[in-house]
Amino acid sequence: MKNNQQLKSKIIEFIEILVIATICSILFIVLGGGHRCLTNYAYSDIEFHLNRIIGLSNIINHPINYKVFNQIGMGVNYFYPGLMIFPATLLIKFTHSIVNGFLAFLFLLNVVSGIIAYYSLKSVYKNRFKATIFSMMFIFMTYRTLDIYRRFDIGECLAMTFMLIVFSAMYQIIVDQKNSWIKLAIGMALVLYSHLLSAIIVSIMCGLMLILNLKNVKSWKFVIIQLCKSGITTFMLGLGFLLPYLQQTRLKINPPFIGNLPSAALNMSDLFNNSLNNTLGDSKQTVVSLGIICLIFLIIGLFKKHETPVEKSFYMLGLFSVILSTKLFPWNLFQKHFALLQFPWRFLEVASVFLLIYGVSAVIDSKRMIFSLGIVGCTVMLFYSSVVNLENTAPAKNIMNESRIDKAMSYDNWDYFPQKAAYNLSIVNHQFFNAKGKPVSIKHWVTDTDYVIKLNSYKSSKLNVPVLYYYGTQAKINGKNTDVKVSNRGTVEIQNVPQNGEIEITSRYTKFARIGQIISVISLLGLMVLIIRNCFRTRSY
């Protein structure tokens, strides 16, 4: 009877937070201008990520989609995890509209983020009211809004949601001595499959959390065992992405933009002013900040006594993350090893999360409900103001519709190209070459899974195709398999080419990549069995 009452209570609790998250998600989209979230600003990644989303349509069997990224067979899925944005691809297929499908994904993302935020922080605060307030404020948080509306960095936005699972699990393991290694492993794997750079930043923060809580550790044996079990499980779950990634890097891949960390770090005065203005920037420039709410929490923490381990731990993490984003940190000493971080202000994603966790703990109280709800209202109004101010700077032609998105499929850059192919304009200009290295005109077309070449009186034994070469690339001549070689410009080269016929080029996962995927799936299934068994043992369902 008692178990039935507990189950009923948990169902009601879930429905309540689902309704709250749904209302917040609707407000987020309506106040944010609906489809105006798909606005192409200067230095936005919208074209890159839309190509990624659309290019995942056949990701289960074909890692490369030949219709996107200028139809040159760019293998971005090997290097940029796509699992967590795959629901956007499915929703686009379901709605038969890229705009409506993405808005449906954004709605779903906000609802899931609200629910995850609630349950993650409930385990930290031990207080439902504070967890609810955090959940609502998290959805409208300034840096998260910046990721969605200005930078269109969907991977980082996803990672911000899942890092809540990681940080709450770490806190439970270190401070509460609670058996949370499964929660930590799942959260870390979800961050990894969302955004690789965020996974590195989150790992750094977990190490720092451990250092800051040295005095709170009651049993080092317990903590070490929990972290080892979690680390091994995360590694096993992540092999589905890591093994293909590591294999393809053997081709010497051209990395993304490498930033100058000391110059890209923010001035403390700029960070303060930007946060005070609560701006996202304009159509020509991105402005990164904590936002005024998190800035206020940062200032409060400098003067208010930290009364609980939650406040002490997360405030110090937030403060250190802020320092890491600025020139106060000696980034010149770390340029060589951390250059791929690109911008030190990326640490503001974790700083915002930590300061919001601290602020809700320190300021929010169910006894002051009107005050607490007023802070939520202020957060929503600040969100609306910053988004409207941003959108008012962009001309209507920058708002992406179906036809403009189709044109965006010709987008390319040199990131993730084999280094042999990088900066070779003959590839992006779709130029074929014969065995003598002379340009030839060849009829060709593409599908999601194939690059098809039509031969008509071709007079050469070789054909250098403007399709990038990665491990797993396969080809057929008139329906029969043929060997594929890498050309001197890093593209696919076909041998023994007939005068007439058809060549089909496609991509498949290598055996090495499939091994990683199989290990990850088996690990996930094993983890699910363990979770179900634990639920029945403890009757915590």
Image (spheres, grey):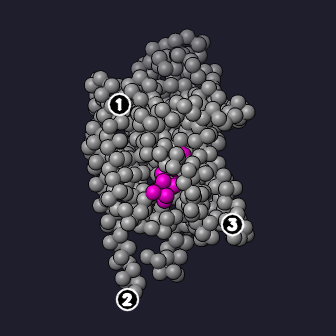
Seen from the viewer's position, the closer of residues 348 and 37 is: 348
Q: Could you tell me how far apart the alpha carbons at marks 2 and 3 are, in whole angstroms?
A: 37 Å
- Asked if one can make out residue 176 in the rendered structure from this viewpoint, the answer is yes
The residue identified by callout 1 is 390
Residue ID for mark 3: 217
**Which numbered mark, 2 or 3, is in the foreground of this view?**
3
User: From this viewpoint, which residue is outermost toward the top?
Assistant: 438
The kind of secondary structure the magenta stretch mainly shows is helix
Q: Which residues are magenta?
A: 351-363
Q: Residues within 10 Å of mark 1 (few under 14, many from 20)?
A: some
Q: Which mark is residue 289?
A: none
Residue drawn 58% across and 66% down? 172
Q: Is residue 360 magenta?
A: yes
Image quarter in which the N terminus is found = bottom left
Image quadrant of residue 464?
Answer: top right
**Residue 499 in the image, given as x and y percentages of width and height:** 48, 20
Q: Say whether marks 2 and 3 touch (CB < 8 Å).
A: no
**Residue at 31% over, 34% down:** 388
Q: Is label 3 in a helix, a strand or a loop?
A: loop
* Mark-to-mark CA distance, 1 and 3: 46 Å
Asked if one can make out residue 68 in the rendered structure from this viewpoint, the answer is no
Looking at the image, is 366 positioned above or below residue 292? below
Disc 2 packing (10 Å; few <14; some 14–19; many ≥20): few
Residue type beneath disc 3 = Val
Residue at the (52%, 12%) spot, across then down:
439
Going by the image, does 137 lie left or right of 297? left
Looking at the image, which is closer to me, 432 or 119?
119
Q: Quadrant of residue 453?
A: top left
Q: Is residue 231 above or below residue 328?
A: below
Q: Which residue is mark 2?
A: 1
Kind of residue sitting beneath label 2:
Met
Q: Is residue 424 left or right of residue 101?
A: right
